[in-house]
Image: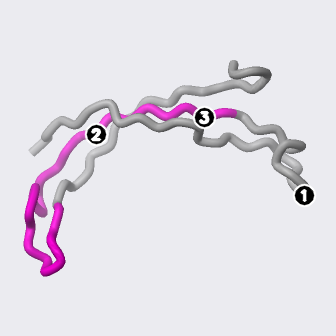
Amino acid sequence: MMGDSPIIILAFQTQQVYCIRDKLGSIKEGGQDTIHTVYYAWAMQLVEAEELGEGAIHPIWRLKEMQQLGVAALI
């Protein structure tokens, strides 16, 4: 809980292509087949409808904080 609002912490991982190119399209870091596993944690806070303003009828979950926990080269 943060004040009167519930907080949910989500932890997940993604597999992302790691390829950085320059303005001319040449690869500077990684490659077209360089895959990294990236770990994330998100803190989501429930925002009540009355706090969202006019016209809102349902509460929403708002991303309050995001953290990248680490990167591991997969291939």
Residue 35 forms part of the magenta stretch: yes
Q: Which callout, 3 or 1, points at the residue further toward the start of the chain?
A: 3
Q: Residues within 10 Å of mark 1 (few under 14, many from 20)?
A: few
Farthest front residue in view: 23
Where residue 36 appears, x then y in whole percent?
19, 44
Magenta highlight range: 20-45
Residue at 32%, 34% (x, y): give it. 39
Q: Residues within 10 Å of mark 2 (few under 14, many from 20)?
A: some
Where residue 61 appears, x then y in whole percent?
68, 40
The quarter of the image holding the C terminus is: top left
| Residue 51 horizontal side relative to residue 20, left or right | right
Q: Which callout, 2 or 1, points at the residue further toward the start of the chain?
A: 2
Q: Which residue is mark 2?
A: 38
Q: Main secondary structure of the magenta part?
A: strand
Q: Which residue is mark 1?
A: 55
Where residue 28 appears, x then y in whole percent?
8, 63
Question: What kind of residue is marked 3?
Answer: Met
Residue at 59%, 37% (x, y): give it. 64
**Nearer to us in this view, 38 or 54:** 54
Question: What kind of residue is marked 1?
Answer: Gly
The kind of secondary structure element at disc 3 is strand
**For the residues bearing labels 3 and 1, Cβ distance under 8 angstroms:** no
The residues tagged by marks 3 and 2 sit, at their Cα atoms, a distance apart of 19 Å
Q: Which residue is mark 3?
A: 44
| Residue 38 horizontal side relative to residue 47, left or right | left
State the image quarter where residue 9 is shown. top right
